[in-house]
Image (cartoon, rainbow, N blue to C red):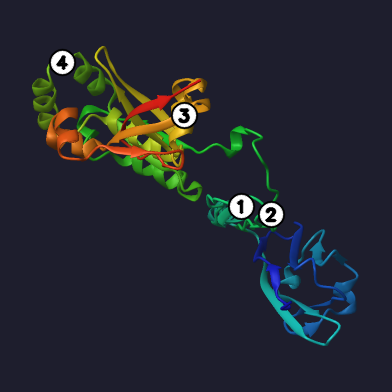
Amino acid sequence: MALEFTKLCQVQLCDPGEPAIFSCACEMKLQGLSATWLKDNKPIGEELAARVKIVAKENVFTLSFDKAQAGDKGTYACRVTNANGEATTCSAQLEVHTLSAAERKEREASNLPVFMVKLKNAELIKDSTSSLMVHVKGNPNPDVKFMKELQLLTTKPVLYLCNVDEGSVAEGNKYVEQVKAAVSAENAEVLFLGAQIEADINELESFEDRQEFLGDMGLEEPGVNKLITSAYKLLNLSTYFTAGVKEVRAWTITKGMTAPQAAGVIHTDFEKGFIRAEVIKYNDFVSLGSEAKVKEAGKMGVEGKEYVVADGDIMHFRFNV
C-alpha cells in the first residue's frame, strides 16, 4: 500500500495568544509509521518544542500550540516514514498577528467544513462489496462519520426562497444576491418569487389570463412552478400518473423506483401482487392525443418488475392478491 496522506495539514491564521493546531493522517492499515515535525525545513528547536504538544495516535499526527506567538510564524511540515524508509511530507503555513475584522471573517468562513467530494448514489448487487468516499475540507481537519437514516435536520438538503417586490420578480435584486453570497459555501440553491404576484396569478381563472399576466410581468411561468421543480430535484423525486374514467392522479415517488415500488405508493397490495405495468410515455400521449392513438401507434409498453419508472410515465398496473 502506497505511503500517502488521507488528511493534510491546513493553513493556520491566528492572533497572538490563540491556539493553533496542525493535524494530518495516513491510511490506518499502514503499520510502523513514525513522524518528524519541521519548521521552515529545520527540526523543531528546544525552545519551541517546550511550548508545543506533539501527539501520534493511530496514524494521526498532531502538532498544537496552546498560545501561539508572533515568532512562531512559518511553514510547518510533518515528515512520515515507514519501516522501509519510504517517506512523505505535508506542510502548511502558520500566520500569527493581530487579525483585522475582515481577516477574522475570512478565517471563520474558510475554517467551516466543506465537502469537496460528496457521497453519490450507488446500486449494489446482493452479496457484492463497495466503498463510500467523501473528501471534506476544514480547519481543524473535520472528523467524518457515516450515518444511516438518522434523519438529522442538519443533514437535510436546503433550498432558500426569497420573497421579492413586484419590480424584482423577473431578475431578483441586491438582497437576493446578498443571500446567495451568504450561503455560497453551502452549495444550496436560492430562488426568488413575489408572494403577492403568485396570489394574483392564482386568482385568475383561465390559462389565457394567467399567461397574459405572466407576460406583462416578464415571466415565463409562475414562481411556484420553479419552486416545485427545484424542490423535487433537491429531494430526488419524480412523478408518474394514473388515469381513469373518473380522475387523473399524480403520484410522487423517489427517482430510481421500480414499477412494483411505484405501485406500492398507491397501495401495498399493488406491490405485493404486482404482475406487470402498462406504460405510456408522457410525450407520446401529448403528441398523439389519446390512449387509443398511443395503442394504435404501438407506443404503449408492457413492463415487468425490473422496470424503473421515468418522470411523467402514465401507468396502469396489473396485480393479483
State which tag comes first along the sequence, 3 or 4: 4
- Foreground residue, 235 or 169? 235
Q: CA distance from mark 1 to mark 2?
A: 7 Å
Q: CA distance from mark 1 to mark 4?
A: 47 Å
Q: Give the residue at x 70% y 57%.
A: 140
Q: Is residue 12 left or right of residue 310?
A: right
Q: Secondary structure at mark 2?
A: loop
Dot label at residue 204? 4
Residue most extreme to the bottom = 85
Nearer the observer, disc 4 or disc 2? 4
State which tag comes first along the sequence, 4 or 2: 2
Q: Secondary structure at mark 4?
A: loop
Amino acid on which disc 1 is placed: Pro
Q: Are marks 1 and 2 in contact (CB under 8 Å)?
A: yes
Q: CA distance from mark 3 to mark 4?
A: 42 Å
Q: Which residue is mark 2?
A: 142
Q: Residues within 10 Å of mark 1 (few under 14, many from 20)?
A: some
Q: CA distance from mark 4 to mark 2?
A: 52 Å
State which tag comes first along the sequence, 1 or 3: 1
